[in-house]
Image (cartoon, rainbow, N blue to C red):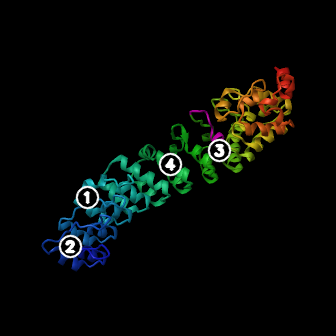
């Protein structure tokens, strides 16, 4: 009676798979039947019935004493997890009546039945689970999972079950997840339910910061239309959404929308005095480097000379991040004196980020060699039109006089 066939099925599990309710009833009446026998993954007859939404057979199995708490070895799902994931709300309701605490059970992915139902967009199942357990945390979980996966109908239904204040309190994480995922319809639902949610922040990052970082122009446009002032909010490090767009690699279109909303963003600096040019170079975004430079620059090229609190100019950032296009850009815009001055005053932070330093050759060391990686040094030396052999000679050919090194002469004469 409990023998397993070649496919791993007992007679009971085979009858459930074939949806043969009458055969199931006959087998359950047989003495010695193992109602909780599972396959190699641990799936029992109740797992099969719950997963396929067979409410009648679920009733039969529960009445016969089937164990609702058994978790399969395949993701650790209980029958309730499977019913919720597949949207069988009638089965979910029956399982909850049989074992109410099953709603708290999590599988190997650390997800409960409510989260699985919300992820897969099963609105009625979500409502059944929320009604069974009126817990604020469950509303938060349902909103977050549905918003993250773009399940509009679930979000709309859950929001209708909450007050405006609750929607704002419990919907912040979900609102930000929708922004990151580019789900404009869900953002609109949240804004209609609780307009103030747009000003919410997680670790001082607003939803606009998240959308700007990911370069999602539709979300950026929606949030700016709802609140242009949102673009002026800064993170703990003083970054605006435009800073984050710059080093996150966003498109020119996103940057233009942010600037159109608040032109003063152009000259706002982070807490470490970092400008938008610094941020764009850090993000290796040459389009934004050129765009910001055109809008910030004046005849004195002060934008390229702007320094962070530790003395780093955009040129330093280009060197630090080994960004050849930006190095060349700066070389064309800055004078030779500016470039040499930057090289001679490379701050200590540049040294830390350069990784392995070139070997410092006695009597030939100079600020360029001390601060820069050999590959970057060669690049810059080439831009300056100098011969790299003057800087990287074999030890036996070293010059003992500083006058033999043209860059050393320039540096010493300018100090």
Name the N-terminal-most of marks 2 and 1: 2
How crowded pointer 1 is (Cα within 10 Å; few <14, some 14-19, many 20+) is rated as some
Mark closer to the observer (3, 4)? 3
* Residue that badge 4 annotates: 175
* Residue that badge 3 annotates: 245
The residues bearing labels 2 and 4 have C-alpha atoms spaced at a distance of: 51 Å
Dot 4 falls on a residue whose secondary structure is helix
Look at 73% across and 37% down and name the residue there: 374
The residues bearing labels 4 and 1 have C-alpha atoms spaced at a distance of: 34 Å
Percent of width and height locating residue 35:
20, 68
* Residue that badge 1 annotates: 69
Dot 2 falls on a residue whose secondary structure is loop
Name the N-terminal-most of marks 4 and 1: 1
Q: Is residue 141 left or right of residue 388?
A: left
Instruction: Answer above or below: position of 344 versus 91.
Output: above
Mark closer to the observer (4, 1)? 1
Q: Which residues are magenta?
A: 236-245
Name the N-terminal-most of marks 3 and 1: 1
Q: Residue furthest left?
A: 31
- The disc at residue 2 is 2
Look at 34% across and 63% down and name the residue there: 82
How crowded pointer 3 is (Cα within 10 Å; few <14, some 14-19, many 20+) is rated as many
Residue 206 is inside the magenta segment: no
Q: Quadrant of the N terminus?
A: bottom left
Judging depth in this view, the residue of 383 and 219 nearest the camera is: 383
């Amino acid at each position: 009676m409990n023998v397993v066939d070649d496919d791993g099925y007992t007679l009971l599990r085979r009858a459930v798979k074939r949806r043969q309710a009458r055969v199931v009833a006959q087998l359950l009446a047989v003495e010695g039947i193992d109602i909780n026998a599972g396959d190699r993954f641990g799936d029992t007859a109740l797992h099969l019935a719950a997963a396929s939404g067979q409410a009648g057979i679920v009733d039969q199995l529960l009445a016969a004493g089937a164990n609702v708490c058994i978790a399969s070895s395949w993701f650790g799902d209980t029958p309730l997890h499977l019913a919720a994931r597949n949207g069988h709300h009638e089965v979910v309701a029956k399982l909850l009546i049989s074992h109410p605490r099953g709603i708290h059970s999590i599988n190997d992915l650390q997800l409960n039945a409510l989260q699985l139902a919300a992820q897969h967009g099963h609105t009625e199942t979500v409502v059944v689970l929320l009604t069974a357990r009126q817990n604020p945390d469950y509303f938060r979980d349902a909103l977050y999972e549905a918003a993250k996966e773009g399940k509009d109908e679930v979000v709309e239904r859950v929001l209708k079950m909450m007050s405006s204040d609750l929607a704002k309190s419990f919907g912040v994480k979900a609102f930000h997840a929708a922004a990151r995922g580019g789900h404009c319809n869900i953002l609109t639902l949240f804004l209609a339910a609780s307009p103030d949610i747009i000003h919410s922040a997680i670790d001082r990052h607003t939803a606009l910061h998240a959308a700007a970082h990911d370069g999602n122009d539709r979300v950026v446009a929606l949030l700016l239309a709802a609140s242009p002032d949102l673009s002026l909010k800064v993170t703990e490090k003083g970054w605006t959404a435009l800073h984050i767009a710059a080093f996150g690699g966003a498109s020119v279109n996103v940057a233009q929308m942010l600037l159109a909303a608040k032109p003063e963003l152009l000259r706002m600096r982070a807490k470490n005095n970092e400008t938008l040019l610094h941020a764009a170079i850090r993000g290796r975004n040459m389009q934004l480097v050129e765009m910001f430079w055109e809008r910030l620059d004046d005849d004195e090229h002060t934008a390229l000379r702007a320094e962070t609190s530790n003395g780093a100019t955009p040129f330093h950032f280009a060197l630090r991040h080994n960004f050849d296009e930006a190095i060349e850009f700066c070389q064309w815009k800055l004078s030779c004196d500016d470039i040499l001055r930057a090289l001679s005053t490379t701050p200590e932070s540049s040294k830390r980020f350069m990784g392995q330093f070139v070997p410092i050759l006695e009597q030939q060391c100079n600020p360029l060699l001390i601060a820069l990686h050999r590959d970057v040094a060669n690049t810059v030396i080439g831009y300056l039109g100098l011969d790299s052999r003057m800087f990287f000679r074999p030890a036996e050919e070293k010059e003992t006089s500083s006058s033999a090194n043209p860059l050393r002469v320039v540096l010493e004469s300018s100090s």
